[in-house]
Image (cartoon, helix red, strand yellow):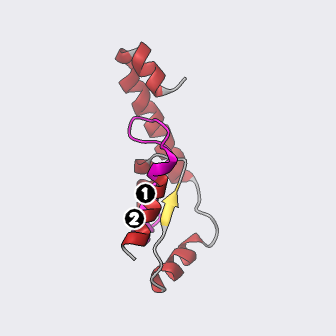
Amino acid sequence: MTLEYLAEREPDVAAEAEAVVSALELDAALTALPAEGLPELLDACVASGRQVAVISDLSEPAVLATLRARGMNGRVAAVAPGMDSTWRSVTPRVRLNALLTCSASA
């Protein structure tokens, strides 16, 4: 059951359910270790003038919190989340726009 479905059918509990899911996602994201070598890769990209976009299945707040917690937030130009703030899947166009953000500012 998605939160969108729940919001339509049980709006009185949807906000609480969204808060629980958001907290669980954030906790999972913050406890996961970054891929081996990722900080060094990001440093190399920054040093060579390359911009990086993160494409993730996580929500944008979870991605940004994880980057901040790992000290990598200043090395990423754009984030393309898997879900928007209402927990709906993000379209491929939204992800493409994140990549275009990188190339437009290069």
Q: Quadrant of the C terminus?
A: bottom left
| 80 within the magenta span | yes
Q: Which residue is rendered at x = 50% and y = 52% of the image?
A: 30
Q: Is residue 97 visible?
A: yes
The label number, if any, that marks residue 101 in the structure image: 2
Q: Residue 75 at what x, y percent from top left?
A: 43, 72
Few, some or many residues within 10 Å of mark 2 (<14, 14–19, 20+): some
Most extreme residue toward the bottom is 48
Q: Secondary structure at mark 1?
A: helix
Q: Which residue is rendered at x = 45% and y = 20% of the image?
A: 6
Q: Is residue 69 visible?
A: no
Task: Examine the residues drawn in magenta and state their main secondary structure.
Answer: loop
State the image quarter where residue 15 is shown: top left
* Residue 6 shown left or right of residue 31 in the figure: left
In this picture, which residue range is highlighted in magenta?
Answer: 70-94
**Residue type of the residue flagged with mark 1:** Asn
The label number, if any, that marks residue 24 in the structure image: none
In the image, residue 12 sits, relative to residue 101, either above or below, namely above
- Tell me whether the residue at label 2 lies in contact with that at label 1, contact meaning CB atoms closer than 8 angstroms: yes
Q: Which residue is rendered at x = 43% and y = 71% of the image?
A: 103
Question: Label 1: which residue?
Answer: 97
